[in-house]
Amino acid sequence: MEASFVIPLYNCLELTQAGLRSLRATLPAGLEHEIILVDDGSTDGTRGWLRDQASSTGPVDGPPVRVLLNERNLGFAAACNRGAATAQGEFLFLLNNDLVFLPGWFGPMRAVFARRADTGLVGNVQLAAATGAVDHAGLFFDRLGKPVHDTARPWWARLAGLRPVPAVTGACLAIRRRDWRDFGGFDEDYVNGGEDVDLCLRALDAGRRNYVALRSVVRHHVSRSPGRKRHDEENSRRLTVCWRHLIATLAAPDWSRHYLDREWQGPRDPGDFAVACAAWASSLGWRRHPSIPVARGVQLAVEVELARWRTLLDGAPPAEPSPASEPLVL
């Protein structure tokens, strides 16, 4: 079997129904596949609908779906892990239930694995369903070390049809099933956020690269599941603590761009020329690892965030502010 499509569900029945219809309608003819729906404790009629789906082909010809029911809400990571554990396909596609699949979305994602032997995870372009604007074309790490949706699609990448990125969102991603197993699946200590980026960083740490297939496009009703953003701060801190050094490297380009904007374009005396040269090289991606001044600046920025989380989440007293004269803290 070539592909297993794993879709975790938590309420939002109408979106699930529309998403499943569009998925079945856009898969290539003859594709050997399975669809696995994992309900994570829905209370809106989803379970009654699932009983019917498990024994029928639905409104569009296709194989019956396989249904797994969690007795209680376990969260996105656990629901995906349970579905993936039963999958038989060579490739896993983890899909949100609030996607609308557009014609031709599948092929470009699948093709990345054939084109790039070093592929870890593959994402795609996601348009906000309400506006049609690009919401996701990969993730990058900002100057504070936080993952941020990248909406840029540079011309050189459009010609190639793909681009390497630090991470992709778990709303629509593909991975070889053996890699999913080797990387350990999603870390269930994350609560509805961060587990996708954590898995991408494990792939990078293992020497793989993550890609966005720029010719694969879906629409996404962003963050419609109840409670989606409730644990963002805890998840962000866990991700930073687990991957602090790798994140510092990945955040260096954005930190460098902000440094140059502040030190070299404002009405103030320019900062240290050597630091500016290092930041310029880092901002253009010319350095695989940041220079010592840039690395120090990113680490200081991360320290500011860690101190904020200690105050916000642990009740610690606020940290002393960084000296105003410190040129590397942005």
Image: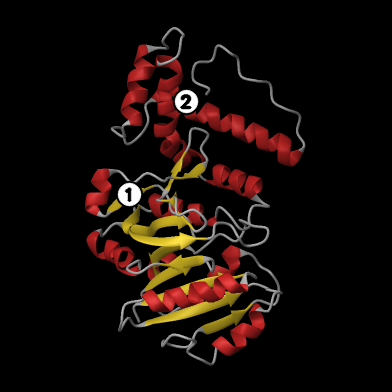
- At which x and y percent is residue 270? 41, 10
Number of on-image labels? 2
List the residue tagged with mark 1. 164
Q: Quadrant of residue 260?
A: top left
- At which x and y percent is residue 292? 40, 24
Q: Residue at x 47, y 89 (%)?
A: 57
The answer, for residue 274, to whether it is visible in the render is yes
**Label 2 secondary element:** helix
Specify the farthest residue to the bottom: 55
- At which x and y percent is residue 328? 49, 20
Q: Quadrant of residue 27?
A: bottom left
Mark 2 or mark 1, which is nearer to you? Answer: 1
The relative height of residue 137 versus residue 20 in the rendered view (above or below) is above
Q: Residue at x 44, y 74 (%)?
A: 22
Q: CA distance from mark 2 to mark 1?
A: 25 Å
Which one is in front, 17 or 253? 17
**Label 1 secondary element:** strand
Q: Amino acid at mark 2?
A: Arg
Which one is in front, 148 or 204? 148
Q: What crowding class fits label 2: few (fewer than 14 Cα within 10 Å), some (14-19), or many (20 or more)? A: some
Q: Quarter holding the N terminus? A: bottom left
Q: Residue at x 72, y 38 (%)?
A: 312
Q: Amino acid at mark 1?
A: Pro
The answer, for residue 89, to whether it is visible in the render is no
Which one is in front, 112 or 125? 125
List the residue tagged with mark 2. 296
Q: What crowding class fits label 1: few (fewer than 14 Cα within 10 Å), some (14-19), or many (20 or more)? A: some
- At which x and y percent is residue 187? 56, 59
Q: Is residue 9 left or right of residue 72?
A: left
Earlier-in-chain disc, 2 versus 1: 1
